[in-house]
């Protein structure tokens, strides 16, 4: 079987270093917010190109915390997309604000800046821009619109560690940015983890308080926070993997290029990389009008595929009642029946990619006869 994702393969390829890092934490004896978290925060901030990184419990927590740090709460609106991981919208609901969901551009599956502009109301306090699948959203118009209206921009970089827009890494564009280190992400822990990054010292300080009961140095709560700390063990593991992030992203790009070449005559819609962007292929998503048949046929031939995402957030039972949909979301609805994520992770072999492509070639040739 060719798996769609395989986080264990990544562990095995850095096993000696990861095992060593984990043993170091065990021996060190400081298991919460110790040296590893502090060093990881410094190294990760440097990697992204920002001043501050705050390690937290997950990507969802990072988004929730960033919203609260920006002063978002009850009575506010936050604009994002419906075609995203449910966590993006869940974080807005957790903050007490109303999610306002807009449509995506058909080329990159990211937020349509025009729809953003026409969805702003006096209640809009922030925008969460998702860099979906590893391709950056169109930040220049989005930031300009936000500035015109005095709205905070929070980037959801959970699928785009290392991606670049106009040469600058995602995470360095907004007022704040949030990362997830879920095991299958481009930078993944061996468990849960996340980070908030920012150049704004005040916002960074707010997050440091929020992640630990709002505690000051004297352990007196200065604000109502909660508990969402990056685990010391996970920080040690992430420090190893961060050193290989660019290399792993390059491997993803090579595999994606191989798919692009091999699938060109299959009639599938292939992912696009805009000329001012560097795509990091968290997922390799194609579109097919016969998606379900293709998925089934691939499964029969031993190729695992996935759908990201099969139901837009505004149609999911938990969120149907509590989000506002500003427009018709035509593209969002259109793509859910077409999209398919093919196997892709750094340790996947070129041979396997060619085999997947060949299998798809045979299936689509059969289908068109
Ligand atoms: C994975 C993901 C998240 C949530 O991260 P967790 O660490 O699982 O909480 C948020 N947004 C997007 C776009 C994601 O892909």
Image: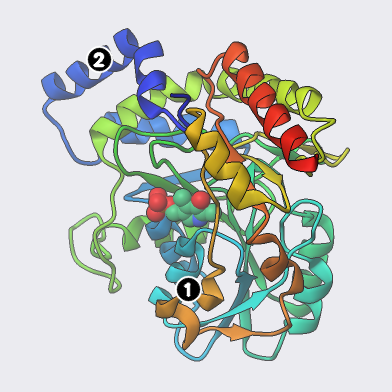
CB of residue at label 1: within 8 Å of ligand 1? no
Observer-nearest residue: 316 or 28? Answer: 316
Label 2 to label 1, Cα distance in Å? 37 Å
Q: Is residue 74 above or below residue 42?
A: below
The image quarter in which residue 49 lies: top right
Residue 255 tag number? none
Give the farthest residue toward the front: 369
Q: How many labels sit on residues?
A: 2
Q: Picture coordinates of residue 35 (x, y %)?
A: 28, 30
* Residue depicted at x 35% and y 24%: 8
Identity of the residue drawn at 23% across and 64% down? 213
Residue 160 makes an appearance in the image = no
Q: In this image, 57 relative to 350: left or right?
A: left
Q: Nearer the viewer, residue 351 or 254?
A: 351
Q: Is residue 182 left or right of residue 151?
A: left
Lower position in the chain sequence, tag 2 or tag 1: 2
Tell me the quarter of the image containing the C terminus: top right
Query: Can residue 128 be seen in this snapshot?
Result: yes
| Quadrant hosting residue 211 | bottom left
Question: Residue 166: percent from the left, percent from the top?
Answer: 82, 41
Q: Residue furthest top?
A: 16
Label 2, ligand 1: CB separation under 8 Å: no
Mark 2 residue crowding within 10 angstroms, few (<14) / some (14–19) / many (20+): few
Q: Position of residue 17 (x, y in %)?
A: 33, 11
Instruction: State the image quarter where residue 151 is shown.
Output: bottom right
Q: Residue drawn at (33%, 35%), measured in percent from left and top?
A: 37
Q: Which mark is residue 92?
A: 1
Q: Position of residue 219 (x, y in %)?
A: 18, 59
Which numbered marker is on residue 19?
Answer: 2
Q: Is residue 197 left or right of residue 194?
A: right
Q: Is residue 17 above or below residue 197?
A: above
């Amino acid at each position: 079987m060719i798996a769609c994702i395989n986080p264990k393969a990544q562990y095995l390829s850095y096993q000696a270093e990861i095992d060593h890092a984990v043993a170091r934490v065990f021996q060190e004896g400081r298991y919460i917010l110790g040296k590893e978290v502090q060093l990881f925060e410094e190294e990760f901030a440097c990697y992204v190109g920002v001043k501050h990184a705050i390690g937290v419990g997950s990507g969802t927590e990072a988004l929730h915390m960033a919203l609260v740090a920006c002063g978002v709460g009850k009575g506010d609106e936050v604009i994002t997309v419906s075609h995203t991981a449910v966590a993006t919208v869940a974080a807005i609901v957790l903050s007490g604000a109303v999610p306002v969901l807009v449509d995506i551009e058909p080329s990159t599956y990211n937020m349509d800046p025009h729809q953003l502009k026409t969805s702003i109301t006096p209640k809009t306090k922030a925008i969460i821009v998702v860099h979906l699948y590893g391709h950056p959203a169109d930040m220049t118009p989005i930031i300009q619109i936000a500035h015109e209206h005095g709205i905070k921009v929070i980037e959801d970089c959970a699928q785009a560690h290392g991606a670049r827009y106009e040469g600058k890494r995602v995470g360095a564009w907004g007022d704040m940015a949030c990362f997830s280190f879920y095991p299958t992400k481009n930078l993944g822990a061996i468990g849960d983890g996340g980070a908030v990054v920012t150049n704004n010292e005040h916002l960074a300080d707010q997050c440091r308080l929020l992640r630990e009961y709002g505690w000051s140095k004297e352990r007196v709560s200065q604000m109502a926070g909660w508990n969402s700390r990056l685990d010391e063990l996970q920080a040690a593991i992430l420090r190893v993997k961060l050193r290989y992030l660019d290399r792993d992203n390059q491997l993803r790009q090579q595999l994606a290029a191989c798919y692009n070449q091999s699938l060109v005559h299959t009639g599938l819609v292939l992912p696009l990389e805009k000329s001012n962007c560097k795509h990091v292929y968290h997922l390799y998503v194609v579109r097919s009008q016969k998606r379900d048949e293709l998925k089934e046929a691939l499964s029969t031939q031993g190729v695992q595929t996935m759908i990201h995402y099969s139901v837009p957030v505004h149609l999911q039972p938990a969120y149907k009642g509590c989000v506002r949909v500003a427009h018709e979301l035509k593209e969002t609805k259109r793509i859910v029946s077409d999209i398919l994520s093919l196997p892709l992770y750094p340790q996947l072999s070129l041979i396997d990619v060619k085999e997947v492509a060949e299998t798809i070639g045979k299936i689509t040739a059969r289908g068109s006869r």
